[in-house]
Image (spheres, helix red, strand yellow):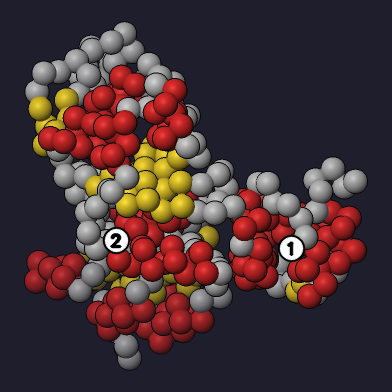
Amino acid sequence: MRILIVDDEKSIRNTLKEILEYENHEVVLAENGEQALSVLEQGKVQIDTVFCDIKMPGIDGIEVLEKIQEMDLDVSVIMISGHGNIDTAVECIKKGAYDFIEKPLDLNRILIILRNANDKTSLVQENKKLKKKDTKVPPLIGKSPVIRRIWDIIDKVAATDARVLITGSNGTGKELVARWLHEKSMRSKMPFIEVNCAAIPGELIESELFGHEKGSFTSAIRQHKGKFEQADGGTLFLDEIGDMSLAAQAKVLRVLQENKITRVGSDKDINVSVRVIAATNKDLVEEIGKGTFREDLYHRLSVIIIHVPPLAERKEDIPLLSEYFMEQICAEYGMSKRTISPPAVEELQKLSWTGNVRELRNVIERLIILSPERIEKEDVKAYADPLFK
């Protein structure tokens, strides 16, 4: 942890420095408020915790604390005072200080406060990362007529609670359509929960969707909330619903009819308010004919049907998609942005793209890694095939 010590008394600065460096922390010193704010504003080093004296000439500790709050930094500020009283401590806490300690300094108390402050800072930083990750929905790239039509449907349907069935082959972007339906809906502040029905064994799908009670089966060592409960108030995305067992289909149908679920091993109904969006790479009408999918569930799910076409049917979107993926991948790798020549883009448009948008992203990533800064037609010919034929 990197710690900033702000105190006009050299003896206090050095004492704290020795203690904290002995505990393997990195220490930065400032003898007044001006120096401390300069360190924080320049941002040359990431400060995790600040020990700040209150009574200092010039900018005092309270002003330093207020400035730090204005900067909105992820740091914990611990105030130090040789003339501590309850009113001063309360004022510091109200202004955003993590804690307050008095002189003479108590070694054990310093270390305990520091450990707790570090835990709090780490939690705040992690929460910010998660929020940033969770709320940023990637764009649905394209200017082709079919993509414009999909956006038009999303804009019309999102504000309602109408159930939507998204069809299309693997890698076309069905999940992205589902996420934008949620993002533009009144439920956008509530959870978006995804279930890949093809990835869950048939014997576990009911427990995964509806939850279970402790002891309801051998490995049920504790109560478990299912995806419907987790999505309460928000959206449940049932991906690859065509692979769901008939038994689970029957229970999903009941939820859609009654807005109630029953956990495995329980006879108690639980009310849920969930918007269900489903997706499949199968022809469900054909599956109904085979007897592997319930016709009544199909009609419940398909109030609105959005078909996401394969990339081969919208090759005019490849230039935009390529630019987007190049910018995204270069940023992930910490590289300067690469460029791609028009002949190289034309060469990409000639390919069959059986893996759709997902395959295109993989090819762009491969080209960025293996090609010079400007990707040319010859690079596409050489590296578009993963076997480099």
Residue behind mark 1: 349
Give the mark nearer the N terminus: 1 vs 2: 2
Q: Quadrant of residue 232?
A: top left
Q: Quadrant of residue 216?
A: top left
| Residue furthest to the bottom | 58
Residue 71 percent across, percent down from the top left: 36, 79
- Residue 175 seen in the figure: no
Residue behind mark 2: 157
| Residue furthest to the front | 289
Q: Quadrant of residue 200?
A: top left
Judge from the rendering whether residue 59 lies leftward or rightward of residue 212; answer left or right. Answer: right
Q: Residue at x 42, y 43 (%)?
A: 279
Q: Is residue 130 above or below residue 346?
A: above
Who is closer to the viewer here, 268 or 331? Answer: 268
Q: Dot 1: few (<14), some (14–19), or many (≥20) neighbours within 10 Å?
A: some
Q: Is residue 342 above or below residue 279?
A: below
